[in-house]
Image: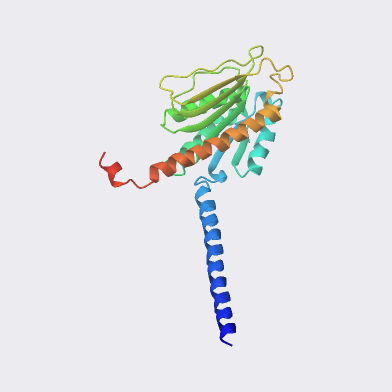
Amino acid sequence: MMLLRRLFLALTICSVVCLAATTHQLGGLAIAQTTTQPMRAPAQVRVDLFRGLADIFSRGMDTLTDKFNRHGYNAHVYSTNGWKSAARQIAEEYSRGQRDIVVLIGHSLGADATFDIADDLDRQNIPVELIVTFDATKPRPVPKNVLHFVNFYQNNGIGKKVGPGPGFKGELINLDLTADANIRHINIDKSDRLHAYVVAKIAEIVQKDLANKVKANKPKTKSQSRR
């Protein structure tokens, strides 16, 4: 009888220890998953896309809009002349404290419109996280309120290389696609390869934005606070 009691006690202790270890592991995983979740959800990333002439040749912007929305982003597509409405909405939301990550994407004349929006927001000291242009017809220097800029262009077409404007200190990427015989001005906006690049770029930027915010909000140690 004594032997059975000792055996029962040993099994009970083992069960408790094993349960505690399992709970600790699950708890650690839950904490890790929680801490790696972005502070900025995809829905807090505002993506405005702009078509080119007469909304006819830029349907790749519609396709890309659908891709963004399937990823959970807040994406809308506009005609070229809709840029003033988009700029006004961004400014109004910013003034109300709704300061989402702003991304502007355009093709042809729609790409030109992203410069108009950026310049308008720059005058109001409103930052633009990312601009992506697909063969802009009249590219201009990138204003200082833009943090990241990606320019897809072809030297043998309408597009041109983009340069920084006064005070610009962000990331500027010019991707010359002249050597790609399959890409022309009328279909550059429809390239699945370029779409995948843009989606990945936004994800990368959002993650960096998260890392910077976590670092900024991290409590300072006594040694850091004395500096």
Q: How is the image coloured?
A: rainbow
Quadrant that contains the N terminus? bottom right
Provide residue 142's location: percent of width, then percent of height. 49, 22
In the displayed structure, does residue 215 sit left or right of residue 25?
A: left
Nearest to the observer: residue 130 or residue 22: 22
Provide residue 210's location: percent of width, then percent of height. 48, 42
Residue drawn at point x = 61 percent, y = 27 percent: 106
Provide residue 131's location: percent of width, then percent of height. 54, 29
Decide if residue 181 is in sight here: yes
Relative to 5, say whether 147 is above or below: above
Relative to 152, say whether 196 is above or below: below
Provide residue 87's location: percent of width, then percent of height. 51, 33
Nearest to the observer: residue 39 or residue 44: 39
Residue drawn at point x = 52 percent, y = 48 percent: 36
Q: Which residue sits furthest top?
A: 156
Decide if residue 89 is in sight here: no
In the displayed structure, does residue 169 sit left or right of residue 205?
A: left
Q: Which residue sits furthest left?
A: 226
Nearest to the observer: residue 6 or residue 98: 6
Quadrant that contains the C terminus? top left
Q: Which residue sits furthest bottom?
A: 1
Q: How many marks can you see?
A: 0
When asked about the image quadrant of residue 138, the answer is: top right
